[in-house]
Image (spheres, coloured by chain):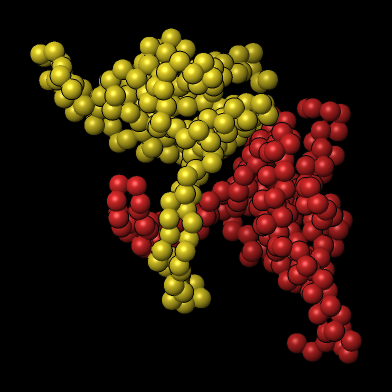
Chain colours: A yellow, B red
Amino acid sequence: MNYPSGIKKKCMILKSHANRGMGLEFELNETNKFYLNENIANVHKKPTPITISRVDFKSRVDAVIKEAYFKTPSTTDYNGVYKGKYIDFEAKETSNLSYFPLANIHKHQIEHIKSVISHGGIGFIIVRFTKLDETYYLDGSNLVEFVESKIRKSIPLSYFREKGFILKTNINPYIDYLKVIDSIYFKGGNV
Amino acid sequence: MNYPSGIKKKCMILKSHANRGMGLEFELNETNKFYLNENIANVHKKPTPITISRVDFKSRVDAVIKEAYFKTPSTTDYNGVYKGKYIDFEAKETSNLSYFPLANIHKHQIEHIKSVISHGGIGFIIVRFTKLDETYYLDGSNLVEFVESKIRKSIPLSYFREKGFILKTNINPYIDYLKVIDSIYFKGGNV
């Protein structure tokens, strides 16, 4: 890509800034540990879905998987319980500066979020624009609305800025996404 | 073991009867598919937790896991959303005739079910006594109560019969565990 002069350098600086973080997945795992330890919520990342083809049993206790394949996930990566409600989300990073390509989320996963909402659960995505060091909460309802409009194959940053909520990175917890959920779903206390 | 004459034969017949089924995991997966397709609930089995040590990248698309290890699960196997509520459970089979050894469930998993309940979720276990061909729903509250009484390291069948609910095997769905949840948690319609 050809950038106007000056832009490229700016990007590099921003990238180096973003790299000070430990990555979105790490920060979310730490956030969930914090929520669990502080008895705020019980949310976990699901294991990577794989198909195991060959296992060597060294002994009764030790087994080594010698051949396995990654499977396309049919659900999202994170789910759990908060104030009795089911919460479910996918987290993604993008190095793009102005849009989030929908190809980063499997079609199954969007269908899953839609289904979660239809069953009264809370579904959403967390997207980090690494080069901008900006992380957004986008509610599942807005995600589905965008996808079903079929206008674009990527969600522009402006859509996140308009419809989403910025998640500032802190310490304990790193990414306090439940604060956003409180503001949307638990305005008057518990639902 | 020495059985009184006649008992051994009876057990064998019962076992052969139980084997007509396809196994608890298969039946629960089919049940969850049914719930999903009929738009009743969205419940999935989590992938097996593993630690991946070595991956061979044949190409950009194909990756083969060449070395991985099974991890002790920190949560239960199944979770999802039903009528807005978070549901979470573990399913186990035992070949014992009169008790379910607590060693079959990791301590972490019992702690997890306790935590789920404390956050307003619905936690439970499904236990099948394969040789009796009897499957029970035992609510998490009863499981925790039993474990915390510390009387025994196994739950006697009588406890399941007294506190639990029998789950008859049918077709579509195989194991209608949500009917039990309705009777406990949604007595007067939605909570």
Q: Which of A94 and B130 is in front in this view?
A: A94
> Which residue is located at x 79 percent, y 59 percent?
B135
In the image, farthest residue toward the left = A5
From the viewer's perspective, tell me whether residue B138 is left or right of residue A59.
right
Q: Nearer the viewer, residue B78 or B20?
A: B20
> Which residue is located at x 61 percent, y 18 percent?
A186
Rendered location of residue A100, percent (x, y) = 37, 23
State which quadrant residue A169 falls in.
Answer: top left
Rendered location of residue B45, percent (x, y) = 60, 48
Tag count = 0
Q: Nearer the viewer, residue B32 or A180?
A: B32
From the viewer's perspective, tell me whether residue A49 is left or right of residue B38.
left
* Position of the N terminus of chain B by quadrant: bottom right
In the image, farthest residue toward the right = B6
State which quadrant residue B123 falls in.
Answer: top right
Rendered location of residue B50, percent (x, y) = 45, 56
> Which residue is located at x 74 percent, y 36 percent?
B38
Where is B14 relative to A18, above or below? Answer: below
Task: Answer yes or no: is residue A179 visible.
Answer: no
From the viewer's perspective, tell me whether residue B123 is left or right of residue A134.
right
> Which residue is located at x 43 percent, y 59 percent?
A68
Where is B148 relative to A54, above or below? Answer: above
Task: Answer yes or no: is residue A11 visible.
Answer: yes
From the viewer's perspective, tell me whether residue B118 is left or right of residue A50.
right
Rendered location of residue B134, percent (x, y) = 82, 62
* Position of the C terminus of chain B by quadrant: top right
